[in-house]
Amino acid sequence: MKKYISLFLCAFMAFAACQPVGPDPDEQEVYQGIKASVEMSSSDPIPAEGGSLVVTVNDSPAFTVSLPKTATWLSCSQSDNVLTFTASANKSAVLRYARVSIIDADLKIAITNFEVIQSGTEKEAVRKKFSVSPDSIEAKADDTQATINVNSEVVWKAVSNNTAFTVSPAQGSGDGTITVSFPANTTDQVVTAEVTVSTDDADAVASSFTVSIKQAASNAGKPAVKPAPGTVLAEWLFDTDQVDALKEGGIESVSAEDDNAPGNVGNPYVPSNVSGNGRLEYYNGSDKSSVPTSKRKRRIGERGEPCIYCCWEGDWFTWTAELDAPLAAGTKFKLNFVLRPSSEQCMKYWKCEYLDGDKWVELETISLDFHKDAEGTAEDPKQINCFINETATLSADTPRAQFRFTCTQNAQCGDGSPLSAINTKYVLRFAGKWSNASEENKYLQVPENPRIVVVE
């Protein structure tokens, strides 16, 4: 009996059915062969070192075997309906396979197919995590410590190339924090050091990291100066185009998994990107061990606004302008900036102080607001820009112009009621000139940049 009846194959049946006049059903072809089945000697892949797999083809007409041209590593011998596949050694770490087809010898049609698989030689190497942050540290002249965060699954050691900069601990295993101690810089020269953190573990993703430390020159001993009124000591621009520039101080270099964030790891800060040598810094002064590490962070928002998460009583931030010489007694200067809470749970009360000689002088406590039931419109916005203007008058020569704001109590800015636990969703923003502000949120724009300027 023939396996086909006329010139039309069944693949054309659907096409023919769509024509205005179809062929006589009695004239259509029907494939009369049998779909073969296979039985393998093993369901496991052929070992990486090489080996054989026996396949028995059942319920099949006369057939041939087709191997992919790319499967040069695999050969096949046939005895009746029994096939023996032999694989050469696989030196790759990746498994490999070949799709084998059993072909009807008469019709040249595939009647079944299957895969021959061979294991790889060795498992892919699993690299162990090992990194440090930040990449560099900018220290003030009177700073005496800095910290480096180690994110690790290996044993590591730390070495300083400057004997005046000591590291503790000098070695460790797993995650850890290295404290770098050094004397205050009383010279008029910048002091530098490099701390190299390395591992001998061959499975680590890297072998070593070097953190550069630059300690500013001291202005002690220099004649104090009284800049002219109107002199801008430091100025910041917070907008979309400045996002990358504002990250240069390492404010986002602290890993979200770092247990000290938002702490003082590496002394991250937001640099004054318009003029002067200034920095905005946030310090962790409270226990946040109960807060998921991924929620404790500082970052620069997409519009360039510095953001603080999980503020709590005892935390503080500073605005600083460094000069080449001390500021003279009698100098009067002011700071203006804007704070904007993202929700009613943000901290409401912040005590303001300024550095006068070597003492902190208290000015006032500022209060943030949030309209819980507002519509978020220009007439009654939920997120309210809190414009802050503080003025300091020095009674003694002072190394820098500096203001400090400390959270005084765990009261929410919505209605002043106390909070018993940190809300991980609220954000405190240092608002700025949004370069991409839309018309509907134009009321959130800030007309002036944050700056420290001499009054008299």
Image: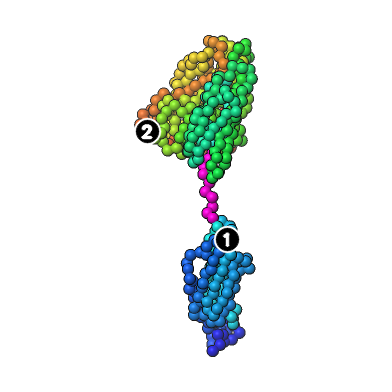
Q: Please tell me whether the stretch drawn in magenta is mainly helix, strand or loop.
A: loop
Residue depth check, mark 1 versus mark 2: number of the one nearer the observer = 1
Query: What is the quadrant of residue 368 in the picture?
Result: top left
Horizontal and vertical percent position of residue 320? 55, 22
Task: Report crowding for label 1: few under 14, some 14 to 19, many 20 or more residues within 10 A (C-alpha).
Answer: many
Question: Which of marks 2 and 1 precedes in the sequence?
Answer: 1
Whole-angstrom CA distance, mark 1 to mark 2, is 59 Å
Q: Please tell me which residue lies in front, 190 or 270.
A: 190
* Amino acid residing under circle 2: Ala
Question: Which region shows up in magenta?
Answer: 122-131
**Residue at 56% from the left image edge and 25% from the top image edge:** 165
Label 1: element kind: loop
Horizontal and vertical percent position of residue 203? 54, 45
Label 2: element kind: loop
Q: Which residue position holds label 2?
A: 421
Horizontal and vertical percent position of residue 428? 48, 32
